[in-house]
Amino acid sequence: MSSSINNTLEVFSSGQLLSSLLTDVESSESASIDDLLSQLSPRETVQKLEQARLLIEENLQNLVYRDFDELLDETSKVEILESHLTVIHGKIEALMETLEKLRSRLTEPYNRVAHRIALLNRLHATCDLLRRIVRFMHLSRRLNQTDFKGADQSTINREVIKAAQFVHELNSLISQDDSLLKIDIIKSDLIHLGDKQNDILEIANTCFTNGFSKQDSSQVGVALHVYYFFNILDEKVDLFLQNKEQNIITTARDVFDMSSYNQARSTGPGSAVVPMTLAQSANFKTKLWNNIENLMEQIFIAFSQAEMLFKILKKKRDPLNQSSLLESTSKPNGLIEFITRINNFLSQTMTKANASSNIIKEVLEGEYPKILRLFTEVWKRLSRDDKDINLESMMRSVLHPFESAYLSRSLSLLFDAVNIIFMDTKESLTSSSNSLTNVREVSLPTKEDIDSLVKTLSAEMNVANLDPELSQAVAKNIGKSVQMFLVKCEKLICVEGDATQVIGPATKSQQCNATIVHRLELFKQQMEHLLSNYSLIINTIDPLMNSAQDSIEAIILTIHNEDFSNSVNGPPQCSLYMRELQGFITRVYSDYFSLFPDTPVVRNRILKVAVRTIDLFLRHATLIRPLTQNVKMRLAVDFAQLEEALSTFHQLIDDLGKHYRILRAFKLLLFHEPSSIVKSQAVGNLIPYSIVIQFLISTHGPPEMKSAHENRGWSITRYSAWIDEHSDEEQRLMLFKETLESYVMEIRRKQVTKSFPEVYTIILDILQKALVKS
């Protein structure tokens, strides 16, 4: 059969037309079929093609005949395959029907579940909205129930913070879901919410203003909490500091602006400024000093209020996360930045004014100690507890240029005082027949010159005595002037031959040298006397001051003999002991203290008397038991009268600083409850813990809780002496700890009660807190 196929292929390949049918037309190098057909006639072409067809059919028949059995087998297999395919097709159709049934059975539950899920989501959203509505209506009802009219300040402080929290939560509910705005049932509440929010903000603003004016930290704390809940704390703090800063800037510019004064002295439009007379210059300086004092007072108030603000921000906390309000502000270092800005502005303004006006230059440089005293009073009165802020160093930096100018003037003045003594001394050369002779016209210092020089040195030292750093700098200038005086005296010493002769009478050179020695010895004695004057002044004044302090203590001790029973009827009046104390202070100041010159040394000794008076009054006023409401009212009057009595030392009130503020702060705590006292910013920061504990024992302590002196069996006099001997706060606190321990032992021994009163818990908390700090 293969030979037949080969023969067929040979037949095909023998002719060009048939062979072309066996090859690839595109790759064949022979002529194309179209070309071959064009060469042959149609008849020949048909014959050849017919011959080829018959040959192919013959070969196919031979192949079928030969492989007939195999072809039948393959055909049966195809039939089997078709039958299998038919079965599979049937099963596929059955499977599809099953899938359709399954899909229909699953789709319906799925749709039902999806529908119920959507329904549940809507129900959940509706329930959540209902909860918000219920919460909103509940908070709105509680907010509307708050009424601040006719309430006392403590109630207002408490209720305003609660109301602010309600408003904060209501606004949070609205911000979380604005669909609440579309609910008709709460539209009226939304209107009331805006009105109530304005009312609360108005009360907060009032508390903020009154708190600073009255130095009441509780009111300021209430306002800050409201601002925090209303999300305007940053804005309010910045606005407060900006207002203070702007007020100081405006005042400072007015103080150091010469244009207004020059305009007042001009004769008319376009005319020249008339030069100042001596009287006008003196009046201007007086006015300038008054304005500078007012400016420094304004700066002190601004610094103290800013300090108070940031202390409260640091102490007050968010009720939810317990973080301080200061942490929620954008400027935790706002106090330092505020003080720095004020100092920088003062420095620039004063430097500019100093360069533009001779009168201001004379005030700032020539009278530098006076302006230093004003600055010193500011940082001393503030009495900062914040170790991170060195207020003294910051404020001194403002004065450095003027201090340098003053020290330069002071040194020039001291040098002039020395030079004027030796200004008449001259040297010249005269010629003789064989040599040149040095002839000196010597003007030796007189006793009057020495006295004048020492007085000048003493005056400079006295002026600078108010400040240790200035005193040290002036002392260096005095040392330079003394050195200059000695050098000039050394130049006057005669060293010629006749100054050392011992044969004839004393020569002029020897007499000159002897006079110089006398003057130097006089100068030495006067300088030693000058240095010893300070200790002599103190030793002279102290006996009188100590006697005055003893008399004041004796008068204050009579507070324990005072009959407070008449406080029940009629308005409270000043106590008898206070009247006596007022009279004594007025008399001792006018009759004795006023005899001494107004110098820093004298002022400091009188200041000690005033401080001692405040300490003794607070110590014994808090020992009175029982300290009832009527007794407190009488004491409040006594506090006011003591302030009036201390006003006798009018020039020392500012120097009292912390002690005077303790007196005023304690007066505010007289009528507070223990729970309110312990929250006061003044406790611990200003008023010593020991005084507060003593006051709570006397005011609210049960009879079994003895006072500290009673617990040890001491008299009040001995107790007062013990307090004087133990100035350390920790030692005093340990005495009160012993008192509380004795009280606990007594209660347990008697088994009077199963629980301790609230005041005991409060005192114990204060004591533990104080001991940790100490």
Image (cartoon, rainbow, N blue to C red):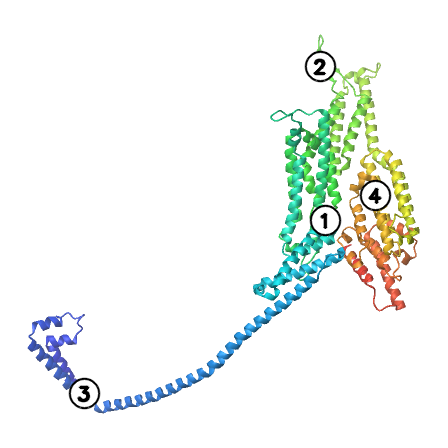
- Residue 249 is situated, as x and y percent measured from the top left of the image, at 65, 40
Q: Is residue 176 visible?
A: yes
Instruction: Tell me the residue that label 1 is attached to.
Output: 212
Alpha carbon distance from label 2 to label 4? 71 Å
Q: Disc 4 to disc 3, how far (Cα)? A: 144 Å
Residue type indicated by callout 3:
Leu
Q: Earlier in the sequence, mark 2 or mark 3?
A: 3
Could you tell which of marks 2 and 4 lies nearer the N-terminus?
2
**Where 344 sits versus 119, above or below?**
above
The mark found on residue 644 in the picture is 4
User: Which element type, helix, strand or loop, lies under badge 4?
Assistant: helix
Q: Name the element at disc 3.
A: helix
Query: Spatial distance from mark 3 to mark 1, Cα to Cα?
Result: 122 Å
Looking at the picture, tell me which residue is in the foreground, 250 or 35.
250
Q: Give me the C-alpha separation between circle 2 and circle 3.
A: 162 Å
| Element assignment for label 2 | strand
Three-letter code for the amino acid on which mark 1 is drawn: Phe
Within the image, what quadrant is residue 292 found in? top right
| Residue holding disc 3 | 63
Looking at the image, is mark 3 or mark 1 nearer the viewer?
1
Residue 250 is left or right of residue 484, and the answer is left
Q: Nearer the viewer, residue 471 or 380?
A: 380
Q: Which mark is residue 428?
A: 2
Quadrant holding the N terminus? bottom left
Of labels 1 and 2, earlier in sequence is 1
